[in-house]
Image: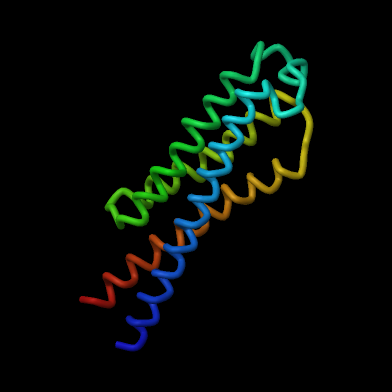
Amino acid sequence: MNTNNNKIMQTRYLRILLVLVLAFCAITSFGGGVGLITTNGLGMTVESLNGVFSSFLFPGLILFFIVGGSSLFAAISGLQNKSYAMWAAMVAGFGMQIWIYVELCIILSLHWLHSFYFAIGTLTLILTFLVHKNNKEEKSLQR
């Protein structure tokens, strides 16, 4: 029984950490999206978009709604312990990684924040895997 209690506590802490990481991604993506839109690039020039976009409006909208929205949805789903919470967290983690990869392909320049947020996307995926794995082990211990 002690093993089961330890596994439950470990899963609870991992889930809380996952929700916090997702909330951080949501908040910073919302801020980044608003910043890109209202300042037309947060100090970057339109030329850095290499002709893919004529302004930072569309990238800002993608960052705000797609990256930030998926992170917020996943965080709320995790808080509410919804059955699809792990899927939502995976989508948010991969979404962050895809956002960074595409951004690097467009601007052809690396900033330390790219590495940081790619790592955050990876951390999201690792935490999602660990929570899912622990959930499965908990269920098998209850039988």
Residue pictured at 27% horizontal, 70% vertical: 139
Instruction: Tell me: 60 left or right of 72.
Output: right
How far across and how far down the image is residue 57, in percent?
A: 59, 19
Percent position of residue 32, x then y: 61, 35
Where on the picture, by quarter, is residue 48?
top right
Q: What residue appears at the point 77 percent right and 16 percent down from the top-left corner?
A: 47
- Left or right: 29 in relation to 136: right
Residue at 39% x, 43% y is 73
Relative to 57, say whether 93 is above or below. below
- Up the image or down, 32 lies above or below 14; here it is above
Answer above or below: position of 71 versus 142: above
Hey, which quadrant is residue 29 in on the image? top right
Q: Quadrant of the N terminus?
A: bottom left
Instruction: Name the residue furthest bottom.
Output: 2
Task: Locate residue 22 relative to residue 49 in the image: left or right.
Answer: left
Where is residue 53? Give x, y as percent: 64, 14
Q: Residue furthest left?
A: 143
Q: Residue at x 51, y 41 (%)?
A: 94
Q: Position of residue 141 (x, y in %)?
A: 28, 77
In which quadrant will I find the C terminus? bottom left
